[in-house]
Amino acid sequence: MISLVKKALKSGQVPPPPSSFRNNNTNTATTSGLHPNSSYRFNPRNADDIYNELFGNTGSDFGGRRADAFFRTSNNTGDALRKAPIMENRLPCSLEDLYFGTTKKMRISRTVADMYGKPGTEEEILTIDVKPGWKKGTKITFPEKGNREHGVVPGDLVFVIDEKPHGVYRRDGNDLVMNQRISLVHALTGQTLNLTSLDGRNVTIPITSVVQPGFEMVIPGEGMPISKEPGKKGNLRIKFDIKFPSRLTAEQKSSLIKVLGES
């Protein structure tokens, strides 16, 4: 359309002048500077100048945003286009993935309709950068990467972080929680725990006080990375479970009474 307008301007094939410049009795234009019998003559001008007067000085960008705004139509009622529903997918991550951060490549499959509305299938591999400290439920959105239905805006594709169970640790916010079972003797006399952290370090934790049922020890800075505070970590919380002996000999009972007293 644009090229046709400019071509017409350059060739001189433009509409006749407005009726206010015409003689009511003849088909020839009359002005104060022309003889009534003179025929109207077109004064050639630069086609681009005329074009800019009509449409504004859009330059080569007319086919871009302004043209899109001019020619875009949504539907017969003038309402905004409806957007296809969100496609949501789980993104399973190990606790180590969420501790260190990782990059995952996910192959997705979406429905794509052709110009006649016939549905087809399209596949794509998307790259997701999982940041250290991200939590279960964190959402990563790829705008308009979902299903593409006929006559609607493509939907968004959303991945939701899902945390896999770990053999030792459980996450609670930014903290790591673990259960540690110790014998009654160690609960009373003390023990040294040797743990392996998520990043593979050997962590030695001495227990020097009496451990009572339900006791929880807090080790600062040995938890999960805090995504909004780079360089900081939560705590490690150790919950103790005391293993009581199933039975005691008479001699053992007597010894305990002597040591602990009857109260």
Image (cartoon, rainbow, N blue to C red):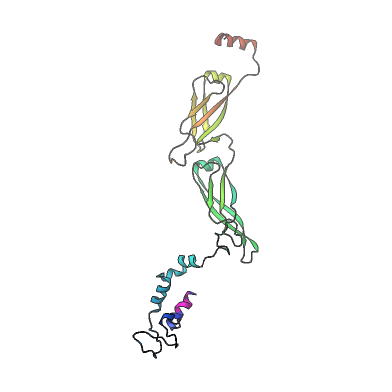
Picture residue at 47% right of the left edge, 76% below the top: 3
Location of residue 72 in the rendering, given as x and y in whole percent from the top left corner: 52, 65
Q: Quadrant of the C terminus?
A: top right
Question: How many discs mark residues in the rendered view?
Answer: 0
**Residue extending farthest bottom:** 37
Picture residue at 46% right of the left edge, 77% below the top: 5
Query: For residue 14, what is the image quadrant?
Result: bottom left
| Magenta run includes residue 3 | yes
Q: Which residues are magenta?
A: 2-6
In the image, taking residue 157 as reference, residue 221 lies left or right, namely: left
Location of residue 236 in the rendering, given as x and y in whole percent from the top left corner: 50, 32
Does residue 151 sit above or below 31 in this rendering?
Answer: above
Looking at the picture, tell me which residue is in the foreground, 244 or 129.
Answer: 129
| Magenta run includes residue 43 | no
In the image, taking residue 133 as reference, residue 86 lies left or right, namely: right
Location of residue 203 in the rendering, given as x and y in whole percent from the top left corner: 49, 31
